[in-house]
Image: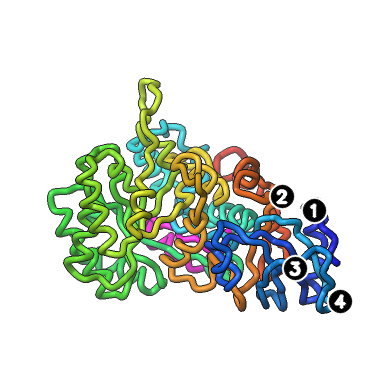
Amino acid sequence: MAAIVSDQSALRAQLDSAARLGRYVLRNVRLCAATTRTDAANAAGTEFFLADASVEKGRILAITPASPCHAAASDPDLPAIDAGGRVVIPSFVDCHTHLDKGHILPRTPAADGTFDGALAATRCDRTARWSAGDLGRRIDFALRSAFHYGTSAIRTHLDSQPPQDGISWPLFLELRQHWRGRIALQASCLFPIDMARDDAFLRAIARRVADAGGVLGAVAYPLPDIDHLLDRMFRAAADHGLDLDFHADESADPAADVLRRIADTALRVSFAGKILVGHCCSLAMQAPPVVDATLDKVAAAGITVVSLPACNLYLQDRSRQGMTPRWRGVTLLHEMKRRGIPVALASDNTRDPFNSYGDLDMLDTFRLGTRALHLDHPHGDWIKAVSTTPAQIMRLDGHGVIATGQPADLIIFEGRSWSEILSRAESDRIVMRMGSPISAPLPVYAELDALEGLAPA
């Protein structure tokens, strides 16, 4: 009989020892039916079910209903570890980040928490300092943080206005190779959509993205010729076999309706690729009939929407006069989900002018999203928004789910319910990769001092 391990450090030690033997059973784990592919999950009919997970050579061999605590092991030589009903989820997938902007806040003193201020401060910093060396050190710092917290896949936007594209994309390819097997990295180009008027630029960036196996993206905002520009983006994506990823309607202006226009374009051209649209804040400020018409088109077009609660709570409705914000800045995920529109949450910006805080911890993102967007009572399958759904939009088979035959890339929390998990930082969570607990400490901020002018380079 397996003894219940009450302490996370003791559980980690037992898992580490068992993993070295190559086979073990993790008994009495609390799995989410939404992120587990097994007959036991289908039969559960609840948010969670208790199970035993057999792991062999780093992969999940079997998932079976939890055995009674007094039951004898079928194989007495097989290590069995009782998790005591701890919640176990698949590793996180973060589908909207800006790794190239991360951790520049200390050197952008002009940033004032507003969107326009963030644009200006970031533009100045990019022009003056975004060398391959600067980017490489900041991005690697961010990836080590994400890995520590349990993220196994990330899509990052890369500012791609020339000449920055010639620096950031080659560096990204190097980093993707360096992190292969730990974090699956995917990149989307990012530029103001009015740059798509330039034929030579659009052809060149689409080729660069295609050669890197990336995604074609842009910041799309209301312009007199926005429909024409969207047509050009969709045509370039189709010509190069690319998926699309847009920033849209990051505004409180109810007249901002680019999400609807993206859906109209996708339906008009019968686009076959995947489309992800981020932010969509203005939707929450529009009249119900306008919202209904837009979301019907988004559903018909098969678009996925990602909300970025940390960044949008930080930026939206901020006043230079010190007034309290009147709205949350997040989009209408409940209304989307009811229509079958896939929805996700993601980290977005971290420690830069667009968001002064954050560390690429998707549990923090999920916690904030749950509170700001009321993703509870019931919690239902919202955990898919930081796991299964972003994995699907990124075309990553095997990520964001727990299933027989898949790598045992898991996160074991101390908490036994969402209330327990989301009430604490869970800083002692156990991150499992290929069936073994990782030992990857958080990087210390002092490593970035030389990039911030606080220490000699």
Picture residue at 54% right of the left edge, 62% below the top: 45
Circle 2 or circle 3, nearest the eye = 3
Q: Residues within 10 Å of mark 2 (few under 14, many from 20)?
A: some
The location of residue 324, given as percent across then percent down, is 40, 24
Query: Between marks 2 and 4, how big is the CA–CA gap?
Result: 30 Å
Residue at the disc numbered 2:
428
Query: Amino acid under label 4?
Result: Pro
Q: Count of labels shown?
A: 4
* Residue 76 marker: 4
Residue at (31% x, 41% y) in the render = 284
SS under mark 2:
loop
Q: Which residue is farthest left?
A: 224
Give the mark nearest the N terminus, 3 or 4: 3
Q: Kindly report the distance in space between the C-alpha atoms of the residues bearing marks 2 and 3.
A: 26 Å
What mark, if any, has residue 67 been given in the picture? 3
What amino acid type is highlighted by mark number 3?
Answer: Ser
Residue 165 located within the stretch drawn in magenta:
yes
Looking at the picture, which amino acid does disc 1 mark? Answer: Ser
Write the residue at 52% across / 37% down: 106
In the rendered structure, which disc, 1 or 2, sits on the residue that comes first in sequence? Answer: 1
Q: Residues within 10 Å of mark 4 (few under 14, many from 20)?
A: few
* Residues drawn in magenta: 151-175
x, y percentage for residue 360?
A: 55, 50
Determine crowd level at label 3: few under 14, some 14-19, many 20+ residues with C-alpha closer than 10 A.
some
Name the residue at 79% across, 58% down: 11
